[in-house]
Image (cartoon, grey):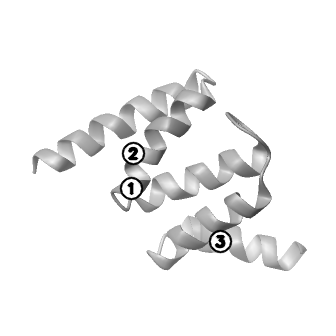
Amino acid sequence: HSNLKISDSIWEEAQQKLNERQYGSARALLKQLIEKGDSQAMLMMGRLCFNGQGGLLNYDDGLEYYQQAAKLENLDAIHELACLYRTG
């Protein structure tokens, strides 16, 4: 259970960084969560990549993060992919 508390703490800190528009710091925290298999962090990282927030604009990386999250049955990521595929 301590791992869940650590992940929750990291997620809260990442959310705070996102709210403060400190996207580079948020990305570093999201990467820690992604390494633990957090699909919501994958989704958020994908959005940051698509918007070029906290790093370079990178559609390929954004798509990869969405796909990883979708494989973990993250419905928001599945929706994002559907929208991307629909609009090309």
- Tags 1 and 2 in contact by the CB under 8 Å rule? yes
Foreground disc of the pair 3, 2: 2
CA gap between label 3 and label 2 equals: 24 Å
Q: What amino acid is labelled 2 in the image?
A: Gln
Q: Residue at x 57, y 50 (%)?
A: 44
78 or 67: nearer the viewer: 67
Q: How many C-alpha atoms fall within 10 Å of the one at disc 3: few (<14), some, or many (≥20)?
A: few
Q: Residue at x 49, y 36 (%)?
A: 28
Q: What amino acid is labelled 3 in the image?
A: His
CA gap between label 1 and label 2 equals: 5 Å
Foreground disc of the pair 1, 3: 1
CA gap between label 1 and label 3 equals: 23 Å
Q: Residue at x 77, y 52 (%)?
A: 58
Q: Tell which circle, 1 or 3, labels the residue nearer the N-terminal end.
A: 1
Numbered disc 3: secondary structure: helix
Relative placement, left or right, of 45 versus 49 is: left
Q: How many C-alpha atoms fall within 10 Å of the one at disc 1: few (<14), some, or many (≥20)?
A: few
User: Residue 74 appears at what percent x and percent y?
Assistant: 49, 70
Q: Which mark is residue 35?
A: 1
User: Residue 13 appears at what percent x and percent y?
Assistant: 40, 29
Residue to which mark 2 is pinned = 32
Residue to which mark 3 is pinned = 79
